[in-house]
Amino acid sequence: MDNRAVYNETTEPQAPRRRPFGCTLRHLWGWRLAVKVVQTIFSFVAVLCEEIVDNCINCSGLYFFEFISCSAFLLSLLILCVYCTDLYESLGKDKVQKL
């Protein structure tokens, strides 16, 4: 008895293979991707440059620069993670725009 016809109609097709860590460039590509990567690199370099300073006379500006550069690095890294992984589909377009 051949049951292939019955089972072939009811089984679901296999899902396509996913890339490691769900990496995708579908939502952020072209010049926008390049700008975000450069922004992340520059903000990380700014954090490193701030950490090199040993002595300062008036440190309030340095502390403000540290806060801004660290915040810029973390936020640009978050944007890259959301737009370049499957997290974008998990959250939904409307929630990503609110975030």
Image (cartoon, grey):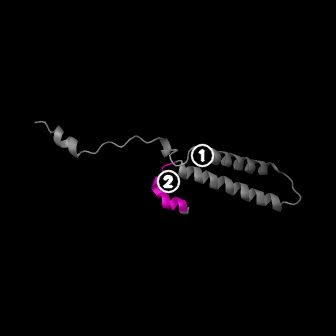
Q: Residue at x 77, y 57 (%)?
A: 65
Give the image location of residue 74, x and y in percent: 64, 54
- In front here: 49 or 25? 25
Could you say whether the residue bearing mark 2 is in a helix, strand or loop?
helix
Most distant residue in the front direction = 31
Q: What segment carries the magenta color?
A: 85-97
Q: Which mark is residue 12?
A: none
Q: Residue at x 84, y 60 (%)?
A: 59
Most distant residue in the right direction = 57
* Magenta span dominant secondary structure: helix
Q: Is residue 96 magenta?
A: yes
Most distant residue in the left direction = 1
Could you say whether the residue bearing mark 1 is in a helix, strand or loop?
helix
Give the image location of residue 75, x and y in percent: 63, 55
Residue type marked 1: Leu
Query: In this picture, is 71 found above or below 32?
Result: below
> The N terminus appears in which quarter of the rendering?
top left
Residue type marked 2: Tyr
Residue 14 as seen in the image, left or right of residue 54: left
Most distant residue in the top direction = 2
Disc 1: CA contacts within 10 A as few (<14), some (14-19) or many (>=20): some
The reply to whether discs 2 and 1 touch (Cβ–Cβ < 8 Å) is no
Q: Which residue is the site of mark 2?
A: 88
Q: Is residue 63 magenta?
A: no
Q: Residue at x 78, y 59 (%)?
A: 63
Residue 23 as seen in the image, left or right of residue 16: right
Q: Which residue is the site of mark 1?
A: 33
